[in-house]
Image: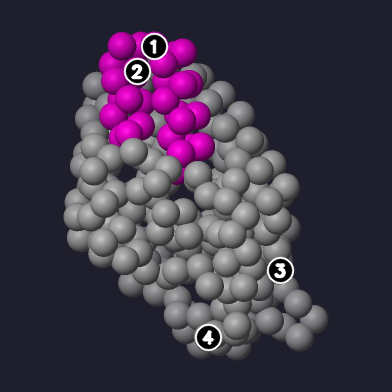
Amino acid sequence: MTEKATLRFDQLTREDGETAQEWVYRALRFAVMAGQVWPGLALTIRGVATLLGVSPMPVREALRRLTSEGALELKSNRRIEVPTMTPARLAELLELRIVLETHAAVRALPYVDETRLAELKRLDHEQDLAFEHYDAEAIILGNLRFHRMLYTAHPHPVTMPMIERVWLQMGPLHRLALAHLERTYVVDRHVEIMQAIEERNPFGLKFALEADIREGAGYVTQTELLEQYARGEAPLNLPQQDFIRTLGRH
């Protein structure tokens, strides 16, 4: 199934002094992270250039960067596609995410002060509101902001670029995960993460974070969902009934 992608950049504005290439890269990266791009959706260099008000050249350059990061593939016919996801590749990405993020969280723990903990609580509350309003994009991006806020407490978050590269490669599956979250994510692990931080408990933090990642991506072992993904049938919008059931995880 091939459809024309609908990309939304209303949350983004081009910054003063930002080059066209940087702007396009940031915008496309946002679209991938937010789960707006998934297999079967067709993107073209000309279409992205028109949407962002730039020439095709910075789009090509931004795509080269995203291709090198494993987020997208640029085909010979100038179509932009998401790389094929197999169960083995997805399992590897999931394990890599757990290794990198538990390491980053434990390293950051001594630097999480009251101000940052309050910010984590605010971000978690915003994500809860996103669930109440059935806003899939806000849920996805809110979750990433929560994790980033924790890891960047460390003054030298050297693993952050590696973590974000894994996020990019898993980005197209984020909405697919949301559509089945009520079956795999029944405990609010963010609450457990914040509790471990308050208790200065690195073992509890590592346990809660690994559970958060595994349960949030519980579809990893569900072959039928990966087949659905491969056919381009991943849901772009989370049905209201699924949101309502998911709210019971708190």
Circle 4 residue: 4
Q: Specify the principal SS of the magenta part.
A: helix
Circle 2 residue: 196
Kind of residue sitting beneath label 1: Asn
| Residue 245, horizontal then vertical, whole percent | 26, 51
Measured in 3D between alpha carbons, the distance from the residue under mark 3 to the one under mark 4, in whole angstroms, is 16 Å
Contact between marks 3 and 4 (CB within 8 A): the answer is no
Residue at 66% over, 73% down? 81
User: Along the horizontal axis of the image, is 155 left or right of 143?
Assistant: right
The reply to whether residue 155 is in sight is no
| Residue 151, horizontal then vertical, whole percent | 46, 31
User: Along the horizontal axis of the image, is 68 left or right of 31?
Assistant: right
Circle 3 residue: 73
Kind of residue sitting beneath label 4: Lys
Contact between marks 2 and 1 (CB within 8 A): the answer is yes
Residue at 34% over, 18% down? 196
Contact between marks 2 and 3 (CB within 8 A): the answer is no
Sequence order check: which comes first, mark 2 or mark 1?
Answer: 2
| Residue 218, horizontal then vertical, whole percent | 50, 44
Circle 1 residue: 201
Provide the residue span drawn in magenta.
187-216
Seen from the viewer's position, the closer of residues 218 and 20 is 218
Kind of residue sitting beneath label 3: Glu
Kind of residue sitting beneath label 2: Ala
For residue 86, which quarter of the picture? bottom right
